Image (cartoon, rainbow, N blue to C red):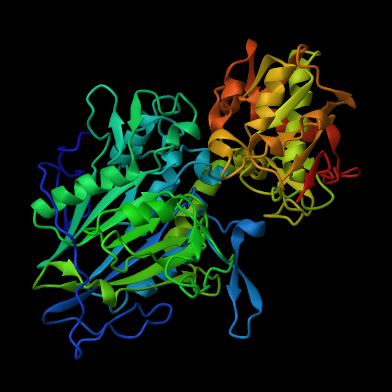
Amino acid sequence: MPATSPAHPRRRRRTNRLLVTAAGVLTVGALAAAALPGSASAGEQGGKGQGQGHGHQHGRYQDVQLLSFNDLHGNLEPPTGSSGRVTELQPDGTTKTIDAGGAEYLATHLRQARKGNAYSITAAGGDMVGASPLISGLFHDEPTIEALNKLDLDVTSVGNHEFDEGAKELARLQNGGCHPTDGCYTDKTFQGADFPYLSANVLNEKTEKPLLKPYWVWKKKDVKVGFIGVTLEGTPNIVSAEGVKGLVFKDEVETINKYAKELRRKGVKSIVALIHEGGFPASPNYNYDCDAPGAGDGISGPIADIAKNVSPEVDALVTGHTHNAYVCTIPDPAGNPRMVTSAASFGRLYTDTTLTYDRRTGDIARTAVKSANYVVSRDVPKAPDMTRLIDKWNTLAAPIGNRAIGYISGDIVKDGTESPLGDLIADAQLAYARTLDPETDLALMNPGGVRASLTYAASGAEGDGVVTFAEAFTVQPFANTVNLQTFTGEQLIQALKEQVSGSNEAAPKILQVSDGLTYTLDLTKSGADRVVTDSIRLNGEAIDPSASYRVATNSFLAGGGDGFTTLGQGADDLVGDDDLKALEQYLTANSSAGSPLAPPAADRITIVR
C-alpha cells in the first residue's frame, strides 16, 4: 500500500481519528520541553485502571493517555511457563512472580485503564503476529487481528515478524480477504485490521516508496498526535529471505527524523515514534526504576543509541523487539527529557503514559510526561467478547491441536545459553535428516527459532506430561523446512565463530547443537576467539578443516539468517519436510506414556565465564 493510499474502508468511525498521508519536507528547529505553570501540575501517577494525570481536561493543557504494548506474537490464550510470568520488585527489595497475559485479561485491563480518560490512544510496537501459538498461527494470524480490532488498537508499527510470510500476506492482514492458498476459515470473509500498520522505513525496492503508511495522526477536537512507525533496519538478517524479497529496510533514526519534519510541516507538533527495536534493562523486574542510576543508565542496547539521536521533535518512543520491560528517560539530542518504554511481550504488560498536550503550542509538555508499566494480571474478569473469539478459533483448531504426539517426564525449557529444548530440537532434526541422508553428521538450530518451553503440567485436558501438537506448534511455529548442506570443516568452524562475531559480537546467538558435537565457549575472551577452535569435537574427534561434513539446519539458517552467512554457502542442498514434523516424529518415536522423554542435560557446550 503506497503512502498516499486512502484510509482503510473498514476503519471504525471514531471522532478522535484522522488519517494523514505523507508529503513534503521542512527543516525542523529544536523542540523545547514546555514546563507547566506552577498551578497546572501534571498530576500524580495513577494506579492500575485509573489512568494517569487527570488534572488537565480543560484550558491550555490537555492530558492524553497513551496505552501501549508490543510483541504480542498471537498469544491470545494466557502464555505458559516463564513466558506467562513477570517479576515484580517489592518495597522491601524482594521480588514476586506474577502470572500474566492472555487477551481476555488484556482487554479488561485496557478497558479499565481507559475509564475517565476522554482522550485515550492505544498503540503498539510491532510483532503483533508471527511466531504465534497454534490458535492464531494455524490460521495465518487472522484470530489475532480480530482480537486487536476488539481491543480498539489505534495504530501499530510493523515488526520483523510481520514479514514472516512476506509483504503480500502483510497487506492481506491490513486489507482483508481470504488466504490465497488456504481460503476462508469461516463462512465470513476476513475483514483485515481496522487500525493502520505503519512501515516508514520499509520501502518497495522498485518504487522506493514505503510499503505501508509511514505515519498516522490521531485527532480529537483541537488535539493532534502523530505516530511514525518503523521496524529494525536489520530485519532482513532475522527473517527468511523470501519474507523480505523486494523490500529495502532503511535506517531507523534517519527515517523517523524525515517524517517528523513532514508532520511538523502539516502542523502536527506532538509526535510519538513506534519503534520495533529495543534495549536491555539493568533489572529483570518490570517495575524497576530505570532512571535511578541516572537518566538512561538503566538501559543498554540498540534503542539507547536510537533514542539519543532521534529528532527532538519526537516526544516519546514506544519500543519492542527485545521482549524486555522498561520505562526510561533518555535525553534527546537537545538534552530534553524523553520517555522510552517497552511492555515486555506476549501481552503480559501494558504501558500507561500521560502526554500533556499544550493547546497553545500544539506540542507535548515534556517535563510533565508520566509513564509506568502495569501487569496484565489474571485476577480480573475475563472479557466475554475475547472469550467468545478464543472459543471460536479453538473449536476450529481442536481436531489438530489436541492430538498427543509425545510424553515428557519434566519441563523441557528453552532458557539458557545451551537449552535442553534446543538440544532436543537439534537431535530431532538430525534424526529426521538421517532418514533423508544416512551420512548426515550433525544438526544446528538457531535459538530464536525456539519460541516456548515444553511444560510438564497440562495446558488443557490432555494430562500432565503429554505433549500436544498445539504445544509443539507453539515451540516451532515458523514452518521452516529441514535442509541438508555439505560444508568443509573450515566452514563449520567459521559458522560456530559467527555465533559470537560479526553482527553477533555484541549480542551472541548461540546455536543449539545435536548430540555428538561438543566445544568450549570462553566468554572471558572477545569476538570469534570465544569459540575455542581446538576444543571443537564431533563424536570425540577434532574437526578436520579439509574434510566434508553433512549438516542439517532449518531453512532460515540455510539462507544465512541471524548473521550466519557461512551457513548460506553450503553445497549439495537437499530440502526436507517441515521442521515441526521432524520434532513430532522424534517425540513419537522416542517417548510413550510409560516411558516419557527426560529433559536433555544441555552439557554439549562447555561455558567458561
Q: Quadrant of the N terminus?
A: top left
Q: Quadrant of residue 536?
A: top right
- Of residues 530 and 392, the one drawn nearer to the viewer in this rendering: 530
Please state if 60 lies on the left or on the right of 478 as rendered: left
- Is residue 383 in sight in this rendering? no
**Residue located 23% across and 28% down the image:** 208
Q: Residue 108: image x %, image y %?
A: 43, 69
Residue sitting at the far bottom = 39
Q: Is residue 250 above or below residue 106?
A: above
**Residue located 62% across and 40% down the image:** 509
Residue sitting at the far top = 572
Please state if 439 lies on the left or on the right of 529 as rendered: right
**Residue located 27% across and 41% down the image:** 200
Q: Residue 140: image x %, image y %?
A: 46, 37
- Of residues 606 and 288, the one drawn nearer to the viewer in this rendering: 606
Please state if 439 lies on the left or on the right of 259 as rendered: right
* Total number of numbered discs in the rendering: 0
Q: Is residue 183 above or below residue 574?
A: below
Q: Residue 361: image x %, image y %?
A: 10, 69
Please state if 159 lies on the left or on the right of 473 as rendered: left
- Of residues 427 and 28, the one drawn nearer to the viewer in this rendering: 28
**Residue located 79% across and 20% down the image:** 441
Q: Is residue 168 above or below residue 198?
A: above
Q: Quadrant of residue 166?
A: top left
Q: Residue 507: image x %, image y %?
A: 58, 45
- Of residues 299 and 124, the one drawn nearer to the viewer in this rendering: 299
- Is residue 382 in sight in this rendering? yes
Q: Is residue 171 above or below residue 118?
A: above
